[in-house]
Amino acid sequence: MYVILFQTPETMNSVKWYLASLHISTVLFDYSISIMILPVIMFPEFAGYPLGIFRLVSEDYYVYPVVLTIFFMGCVLVSIIAIFEKQFYTLCSFSEKAKWGSFRRPWLIGHCILTTGSCISFGCFVPEQTSARKIVFLKLPRLPDYIYEIPIFVFTDDGSYHLTVFLILIPFTCIEISIFVISIIRTISKLLNISKMSRKSYRLQKIVFIALVIQTGLPLITLIVPFVYSWISILWRYYNQGLMNIAVIVTTIHGLSSTLVMLLVHRPYRDRLLAVFCFERDLQKNLLTSIVAVFENRFYVVCSFSGKESWKYWRRYWLAGHYIATFFIVLSLLAVVPEQKSARQRLLEKIPCVERYAYEEELLVFAEDPLLCFILCVVVTIVIALLGVATRICETSEILDLRNKANTTSR
């Protein structure tokens, strides 16, 4: 969010707030589905149960996070439409542009109202849960015993209305975005051909436009693929919980992929990200990937000390030693993994109020005494913190020395 608000270049100022809106919508959607709900969806039936935070609340309230998640997904699509409409309005010239200028805000507000109304209407089709669960279990094949004891939430017993809404809104959204994209491409090409746009302006607009297409297009794959599988599952009445769980996992990485693509495709954002970690242009080929290596790199670039030339020679071996030590530390942790059958029994005896299905699952007991793991984590955290503090002190000292030299020179 910081790079959007404070590092957006002038060539992208027209879409800065639209990018911020898209990022906020993406974050809310990602958090709602991957943290708040984390659903186990039982398509082809519109039912499932949460594994996220909302599993702690009563099943009577499950409808609210589901509707909110669908609403946030709709906000993501509306934000994408708004970005390309803004580019369309800024670049394209057409006879009705003045009328469109007065109509575009109500048009965008209409999209928000339509999204909100559709999501609220979904909540009106939630059936009485006790009888709906019985119907769902009759339609699905034989399930593991523990699922019959979980309070399954049935979103609707007839998904015809929901499918109709999606079949109308999603193609309509794709058509709108396609119209804006095609119009922008034609306008930029036309302005270049009639010499109303310089090569430099054309190159800048082309870079921004391609970056926006990549930023919005690539993360949408994480929504399109699960949607296609869900549609096939519903149409062919095909139930496969493993594939459905994979589809949910793919959906949960939408926020991460959207943020990474945004930071990588826009050069100002990418340069700022590299600057935060002090990756200079001539050092980008170095494999400084760990947190310790990031602080060491900043220490090496900023600080001046008598043994810097010697450290320049040893730093690669020092980093390689860290990777080797990490490998052996992880390998040593495997030595404390206990015999699983007896360890599971002791674990379940220690933990109160365990769900019944946990006794049937193949739980992995990594360590019965977590003291070693805890000590290693504390040591690593202290080392990283000390290195970070030392780097910061050294950097501050260098800045103060430069200021003193500047003041001395000015006098």
Image: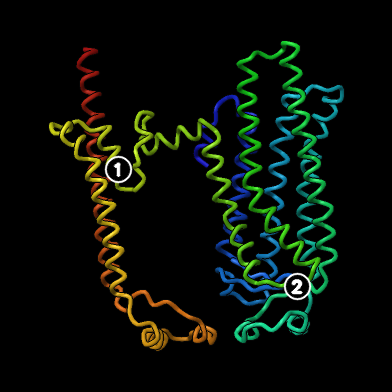
292 sits to left or right of 227 = left
Q: Which mark is residue 389?
A: none
Can you name the residue that lies furthest to the left here? Answer: 306
Residue at the (59%, 58%) spot, across then down:
252
Q: Nearer the viewer, residue 178 or 406?
A: 178
**Image point (61%, 64%), residue name:** 246
Q: Nearer the viewer, residue 74 or 211?
A: 211
Question: Mark 1 — residue?
Answer: 295
Give above or below for 167 relative to 197: below
Q: Position of residue 210 (x, y in %)?
A: 64, 32
- Quadrant location of the C terminus in the rendered image: top left
- Image coordinates of residue 260 in percent, x first then y, are 53, 44
Asked whether, in this view, residue 57 is left or right of residue 296, the answer is right
Q: How far apart are labels 1 and 2 at the CA level?
A: 51 Å
- Residue at point 57% right, 58% down? 31
Labels 1 and 2: the sequence-earlier one: 2
The residue that appears at 76% across and 12% down in the rendered structure is 194
Please tell me in which quadrant of the rendered image residue 136 appears.
bottom right
The three-letter code of the residue at mark 2 reads Glu
Residue 151 drawn at (x, y percent): 65, 80
User: Three-letter amino acid code at disc 1?
Assistant: Phe
Image spot of residue 62 (x, y percent): 66, 71
Q: Which residue in the structure is indicated by mark 2? A: 45
How many neighbours does mark 2 have within 10 angstroms: few (below 14), some (14-19), or many (20 or more)?
many
Horizontal relation, residue 386 to residue 29: left or right: left
